[in-house]
Amino acid sequence: QVQLVESGGGLVQPGGSLRLSCAASGAIFRINAMDWYRQVPGKQRELVAAITTDGNTNYADSVKGRFTISRDNAKNMVYLEMNNLKPEDTAVYYCRADVRRLISSSYYPYWGQGTQVTVSS
């Protein structure tokens, strides 16, 4: 099986910083795109940032210039550096990855369980 586990969430004051990490483990042959999403109660889950295998990135307009996504392909990890955090960034953050398992020739999406980020004074 494949598991994605996020870490690094917590409570931070406005203007502060946090770094989220997501580790993928299990019977993994290769990982394609890796993304970070976030969700607040009553709203749809939204894409925050995405990164391809060769490092091309894409960001939601609301986080451009403040968030940075990166990955370590050797370790099957993806990171989200969040700076100048605002109260509206408060949400549960999820990582997602397109994974090809050892026993498969296709890629399937896998999700982590989420980590809470709260921005408040």
Image: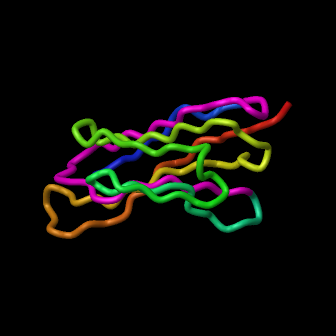
> In the picture provided, is 82 more to the left or to the right than 27?
right
Task: Classify residue 46 by image quadrant.
Answer: bottom right
Q: Is residue 81 above or below residue 40?
A: above
Q: Is residue 1 above or below residue 12?
A: below
Q: Position of residue 72 (x, y in %)?
A: 30, 39
- Residue 37 belongs to magenta span: yes
- Which residue appears at 61% of the width and 55% of the height? 38
Q: Which residues are magenta?
A: 12-40
> In the picture provided, is 27 more to the left or to the right than 65?
left
> In the picture provided, is 55 more to the left or to the right than 90?
left
- Which residue appears at 59% of the width and 42% of the height? 115
Q: Position of residue 24 (x, y in %)?
A: 34, 44
- Residue 73 belongs to magenta span: no
- Which residue appears at 74% of the width and 33% of the height? 15
Looking at the image, which is closer to me, 107 or 80?
A: 80
Residue sticking out furthest to the right: 121
Instruction: Give the dominant element type of the magenta stretch: helix, strand or loop.
Output: strand
Q: Is residue 66 above or below residue 101?
A: above
- Which residue appears at 40% of the width and 43% of the height? 70
Question: How many dots with numbers?
Answer: 0
Looking at the image, which is closer to me, 83 or 113?
A: 83
Looking at the image, which is closer to me, 60 or 121?
A: 60
Q: Position of residue 65 (x, y in %)?
A: 59, 47
Q: Quadrant of the C terminus?
A: top right
> In the picture provided, is 109 more to the left or to the right than 118?
left
